[in-house]
Amino acid sequence: MIEFWQSHGYAWVILPLLIFLARILDVSIATMRFMFLARGAVWPTVVSGFFEALIWLVIISQIIRNLDNAMCFIAYAGGFAAGSYVGMKIEERLALGKVLMRIVLHQPAAELIAALQERGYGVTNVAAEGTKGPVRILFMIIKRVDMADIVALIKKFNPKAFYTVEDIRYVSQGVFPLATQSRPTGMGIWSRWRSRSR
């Protein structure tokens, strides 16, 4: 058994692979921690920070013990890059929190507004003046999980519309579709964490 831990196969293949996988996990957790922190979730931030630091210490301890092994350095850097990608994908899948969406329309907005309201979205409609004439600006506070649905409606009714999306931390009130409240997404997890942390 001791011979295995001291073998070239372990040092140049298995150990770098473990460092690579652990680094993916570490960076993915870090991405989630930043997401929780930005949304004011106390306990998820604390727990994810603990495991992030623990995994990082284990990785660094292995690298320090193997400073002459270039594969460990490559695995560490590769794991960081892959972990950033994996963390972003996890965040997209969970779709936590709510966002502010602004939609600027040069075309008549009645059909889009009607379609949004029919689906249960709250829409604030403001008349404004753009560089090329009068426009309509729609303001919406929506769940991130619903953003793709709204973008699809925009492309259907007003494909030339300009829209921006911003993350928001707190919302005191709002109008949201009832159907999305039971969707099996990260929103349910987020809601439970928020209710416990208050």
Image (tube, helix red, strand yellow):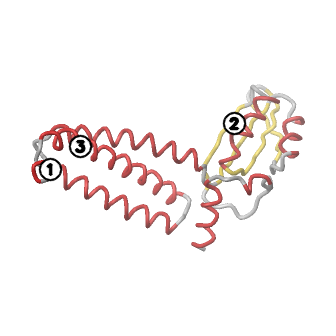
Q: Position of residue 88 (x, y in %)?
A: 49, 43
How far is mark 3 from mark 1, CA to CA?
10 Å
The disc, 3 or 1, on the residue closer to the chain's N-terminal end is: 1
* Mark 3 to mark 2 CA distance (whole Å): 48 Å
Image height check: is 180 above or below 77? below
Q: Residue shown at 49%/64% (left/top)?
A: 44
Q: CA distance from mark 1 to mark 2?
A: 57 Å
Q: Position of residue 15 (x, y in %)?
A: 22, 45
Q: Find residue 37 and name its label.
A: none
Label 2 neighbour load within 10 Å: few <14, some 14-19, many 20+: some
Marks 3/1 in contact by CB < 8 Å: the verdict is no
Q: Give, as a three-letter code, the residue at label 3.
A: Ile
Residue 5: which numbered mark, if any?
1
- Name the residue carrying label 3: 14
Of the residues under marks 1 and 2, which one precedes in the sequence? 1
Q: Position of residue 100 (x, y in %)?
A: 68, 48
User: 72 left or right of 93?
Assistant: left
Marked residue nearer the N-terminal end (3 or 2): 3
Comparing labels 3 and 2, the label whose residue is closer to the camera: 3
Q: Quadrant of residue 175?
A: bottom right
* Relative depth, front residue between 95 and 37: 95
Disc nearest the viewer among 1 and 2: 1
Residue annotated with mark 2: 163
Q: Residue at x 31, y 57 (%)?
A: 55
